[in-house]
Amino acid sequence: MRPRGRTGGGGRQRTPGGKLPARIYITGFMGSGKSTVGPLLALALGYQFIDLDDVIAEKEGQTIPEIFDGRGEKEFRAIEQRELRALLAHEKVVVATGGGALTNPATLAALRRSGILLYLRVPAETLFERLRGARGRPMISAASGLPLDDDALRGRINRLLAEREQSYRESDIVVEAAGRTPAETVAAVIAALNPPQAAAKRS
């Protein structure tokens, strides 16, 4: 059985056989720090970092907002699922997924089979503070493309979190990322992964 659990930084979770997984998929709401923590985690583990949104934008020749505006969320999710499956051919990678990627059950199942899912959990109010006035994020923008006002943004964040939280909770590791620096978050993740070299250093 796959190990699953959560840690606020003090807990530990060993991967099967005490080995690092071939793939670590970082999930979480927009603004949770995936694209900041991901490169630092990859560097610490000697892995390659891949940002899924960057892969999609490069392959499609459009920005994420342009894809949403011109082709809609349903088409974007189909592209997202296709590109995530293509990444299954890679090993020793840390992949930052889109905030809504796991809402597709087939995507969630594929990622859980092929690697470790890491959820960077951040409370709604912290996300609100981080995302106020943000541009280029279709899921929290008005139909005009402009940022939502404060009340609408809070409502949108709460609604999307409610829709996605169950999927996020399917992750193998949950790290509370609020109130931590990116480096501290990485340290909590590595403690949860508990690779052999970390155990050796503690002994």
Image (cartoon, helix red, strand yellow):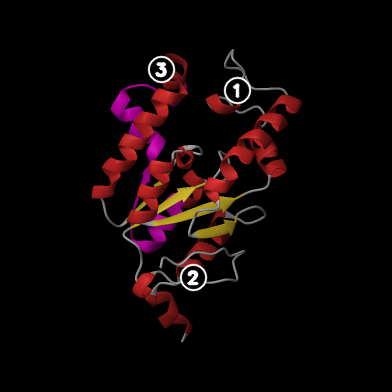
- In this rendering, the answer to whether 67 lies above or below 87 is above
Name the N-terminal-most of marks 3 and 1: 3
* Quadrant housing residue 70: top left
Q: Residue at x 37, y 62 (%)?
A: 45
Label 3 to label 1: alpha-carbon separation: 16 Å
Work out whether 176 lies above or below 100. Answer: below
Q: Nearer the viewer, mark 1 or mark 2?
A: 2
Q: Is the C-beta separation of discs 3 and 1 under 8 Å?
A: no
Q: Is residue 46 above or below residue 76?
A: below
Label 3 vs 2, first from the N-terminus = 2
Report which residue position mark 2 lands on: 13
Kindly identify the residue that appears in the image at 59 percent across and 15 percent down. Answer: 143
Q: CA distance from mark 3 to mark 2?
A: 41 Å
Magenta-highlighted residues: 38-65
Answer with left or right where residue 110 lies relative to residue 177. Answer: left
Q: Position of residue 164 (x, y in %)?
A: 57, 41
Give the residue at mark 1. 141
Crowding near the residue tagged with mark 3, few <14, some 14–19, many ≥20 C-alpha atoms within 10 Å: few
Image quadrant of residue 152?
Answer: top right
Q: Secondary structure at mark 2?
A: loop
Judging from the image, what secondary structure is the residue with disc 3 in?
helix
Q: Amino acid at mark 2?
A: Gln
Secondary element type, mark 1: loop
Residue 64: x and y, percent? 43, 26
**Side of 196 relative to 85 (left or right):** right
Residue that label 3 marks = 71
